[in-house]
Image: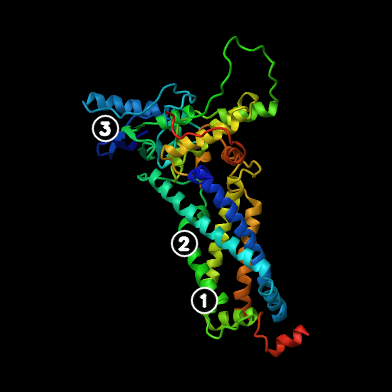
């Protein structure tokens, strides 16, 4: 296969960026998308040009490092699939692919296709944890969790924090990410004591990070490589108003400092 | 309370509650409009009831006014936040499930606000309606849509906008409040679809009725014979 790539090249965070056209020859259908970029980079390096920078780590769809807009769709055309798990058989010989980094004010470009997603880390720091007494691991089954609750928590916990939801959202909203992180704790007994306070803290931090707000386009759910549902956002909103009504003693701070 | 309003989720909740209040009003308004098909007595009696019962009329007006203002202010502020959050757009961006309704709701809502003002000046105060008769909405509807054809077309166009707004807004509001039942796909929304279509058809039925002659002037003999 021979493909034409239009790739966003930006040498530094505040530098001017632009789409540069490359030709990818000898692409085989069983290459992953990142392997295809590796081959292109090999060629660029041999010619003495700087390779296209992109984030990647596990290359098996579980770490959340990779991610780019491929022809205007986060993680490319295959549903529920990360960029690393996308294979070139999803494309045809002669296709032109436009490859861009996630675009959001909260995700500044570091270089080429790499963006700074530390805003997500700060949302987690604001409340995405449970405070427990440390010590030995508790005995198995001392804390029963109903099957349905375990499944619901797992569905939300599938979020790998890749940022596709923010990238796909026309509002640049991090609602799906924040809601998933709230949900996977709020379905479990361990998450209950801090449940409502957590909702206030994480929503406050989400707002602090210059993300947009949810208008229910539904694009995040379509883009999510882990099929996290927008129902999680409904649950976040419910916890938020419950917290606003009933959570009076806890002081809510904005920011993680 | 201040923290609630400062939060984007808090503002969305305000939009959801006020939006549902207004949607509830629209359903009442549309149903009452259809009284025009029963003849002048029914709809004029309803109008008289409202105007002679200030303890119903004024609280309703105040709640609606407050709802419009809160809804619009939240919408404006939230859309500014979102515009800043996605200041740089993609060279290529393909939306996958966003509906026409959700994509147009911001700009169309400006149009809706304009329509509300025109509508109030038209049928409530009568400023824009030559020959306006106080306390006789039936006559006003007929004169309005018969003599001002452009207005009738404008109303019909705006009712499509109302339908689209409710199609996206009613569904979103329930989700924003966290009261929705889990759905696998954002396009599946039977209740919002039914309400939106009912509002669009129900509201459009009045200008269409006048234009086609189904709703006739009160003095029209064919009509009175039929009514008696």
Judge from the rendering whether residue B34 lies leftward or rightward of residue B79; answer left or right. Answer: right
Which residue sits at x=40%, y=29%? A118
Residue A46, quarter of the rendered image: top left
The chain ID associated with circle 1 is B
| Residue on which the image places disc 1 | B151
Q: Residues within 10 Å of mark 3 (few under 14, many from 20)?
A: few
Residue at (25, 39) in percent of width and height: A16
- Label 3 marks a residue whose chain is A
Q: CA distance from mark 2 to mark 3?
A: 40 Å
* x 39%, y 27%: residue: A34
Residue at x 50%, y 32% (from the top left corner): A81
Q: Which residue is mark 2?
A: B110
Q: Secondary structure at mark 3?
A: loop
- Other-residue count near label 2 (Cα within 10 Å), few / some / many at <14 / 14–19 / ≥20: few
| Residue A144 picture quarter | top right
Question: Is residue B42 depicted above or below A232 in this figure?
Answer: below
Residue A12, numbered label: 3
């Amino acid at each position: 296969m021979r493909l034409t790539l239009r790739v966003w090249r930006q040498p530094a965070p505040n530098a001017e960026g632009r789409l540069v056209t490359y030709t990818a020859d000898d692409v085989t259908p069983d290459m992953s998308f990142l392997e295809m970029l590796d081959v292109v980079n090999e060629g660029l390096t041999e010619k003495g040009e700087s390779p296209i920078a992109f984030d990647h780590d596990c290359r098996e769809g579980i770490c959340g490092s990779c991610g780019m807009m491929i022809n205007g769709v986060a993680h490319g055309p295959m549903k529920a699939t990360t960029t690393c798990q996308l294979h070139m058989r999803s494309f045809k010989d002669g296709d032109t692919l436009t490859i861009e980094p996630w675009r959001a004010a909260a995700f500044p470009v570091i270089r080429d296709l790499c963006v700074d997603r530390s805003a997500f880390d700060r949302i987690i720091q604001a409340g995405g944890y449970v405070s427990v007494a440390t010590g030995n691991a508790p005995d198995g089954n001392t804390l029963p969790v109903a099957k349905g609750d375990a499944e619901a928590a797992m569905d939300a916990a599938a979020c790998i924090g890749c940022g596709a939801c923010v990238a796909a959202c026309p509002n640049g909203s991090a609602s799906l990410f924040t809601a998933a992180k709230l949900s996977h704790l709020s379905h479990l007994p361990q998450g209950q004591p801090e449940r409502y306070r957590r909702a206030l803290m994480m929503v406050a931090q989400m707002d602090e990070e210059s993300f947009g707000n949810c208008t229910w386009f539904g694009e995040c759910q379509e883009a999510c490589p882990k099929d996290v549902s927008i129902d999680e956002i409904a649950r976040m909103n419910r916890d938020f108003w419950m917290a606003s009504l009933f959570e009076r003693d806890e002081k809510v701070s904005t920011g993680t400092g | 309370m201040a923290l609630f309003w400062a939060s984007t989720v808090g503002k969305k909740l305000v939009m959801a509650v006020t939006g549902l209040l207004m949607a509830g009003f629209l359903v009442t308004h549309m149903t009452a409009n259809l009284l025009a098909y029963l003849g002048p007595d029914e709809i004029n009696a309803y109008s008289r009831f409202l105007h002679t019962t200030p303890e119903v009329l004024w609280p309703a007006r105040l709640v609606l006014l407050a709802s419009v203002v809160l809804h619009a202010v939240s919408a404006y502020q939230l859309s500014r936040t979102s515009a800043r959050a996605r200041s740089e757009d993609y060279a290529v961006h393909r939306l996958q499930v966003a509906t026409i309704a959700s994509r147009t709701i911001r700009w169309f809502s400006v149009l809706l606000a304009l329509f509300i003002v025109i509508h109030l000046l038209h049928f409530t105060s009568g400023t824009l309606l030559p020959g306006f008769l106080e306390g006789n909405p039936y006559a006003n509807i007929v004169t309005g849509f018969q003599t001002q054809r452009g207005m009738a077309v404008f109303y019909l166009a705006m009712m499509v906008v109302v339908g689209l707004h409710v199609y996206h807004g009613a569904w979103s509001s329930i989700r924003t409040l966290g009261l929705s039942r889990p759905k696998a796909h954002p396009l599946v929304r039977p209740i919002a679809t039914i309400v939106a279509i009912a509002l669009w058809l129900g509201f459009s039925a009045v200008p269409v009725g006048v234009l086609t002659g189904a709703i006739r002037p009160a003095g029209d003999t064919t009509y009175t014979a039929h009514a008696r």
